[in-house]
Image: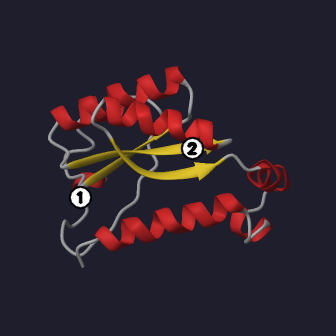
Amino acid sequence: MLRELPADDLLVVVDMEASPEHLARSTAEAVDLMLVVAEPWFRSLETARRSVALAVDLGIPRVAVVANKLRDAGDREAVEAFCARHGIELFATVPYDDALGDAERTGAAPVDHDADARSVDAIDRLVDRVLGLARW
């Protein structure tokens, strides 16, 4: 289906599974920006590093990390240091936020559950940044 979409004047956001399989099947061949979500733990960051390397090898022009569930400044510093050490762009950060779990338990979208939540604000900034890159 992704191959059939027109390439011009279209912004498509796809949430892929947390595995490199979709990259191996060439479903990312028309991707301009790939964001790899990582949590601030070594295994997650190492998995993200491998995904970034594979995406770069496949010719995706821009690949970056979104750090998710950051609990404190130490988590942020660890992610920043890891990304810097491996030459990976850190595109955005999203804090750990109990409001997301609360929203999930009630079946509500996070923005509907608590529009003022820190995570909702961070996600809004991430979306604004992606939209700012769009070539309309």
Locate residue 91 relative to residue 74 in the image: left or right: left
For the residue pair 72 and 113, the one nearer the viewer reads as 72
Residue 94 visible to the viewer:
yes
Q: Is residue 51 left or right of residue 4?
A: right
Residue under the point 18% across and 72% down: 8
At label 1, the amino acid type is Glu
Left or right of residue 56: residue 119 = right
- Residue located at (37% from left, 71% from top): 131
Q: Which mark is residue 23?
A: none
The image shows residue 45, relative to residue 33, as above or below, that is above
Residue 17 visible, this angle: no
Q: Position of residue 121 (x, y in %)?
A: 62, 66
- SS of the residue under disc 1: helix
User: For mark 2, what is the residue?
Assistant: 68
Q: Position of residue 54 (x, y in %)?
A: 25, 29
Crowding near the residue tagged with mark 1, few <14, some 14–19, many ≥20 C-alpha atoms within 10 Å? few
Residue at 69 percent across and 46 percent down: it is 96
Helix, strand or loop at label 2? It is strand
In the rendered image, which residue does mark 1 sit on?
4
Mark 2 or 1 closer to N-term?
1
Q: Residue furthest bottom?
A: 136
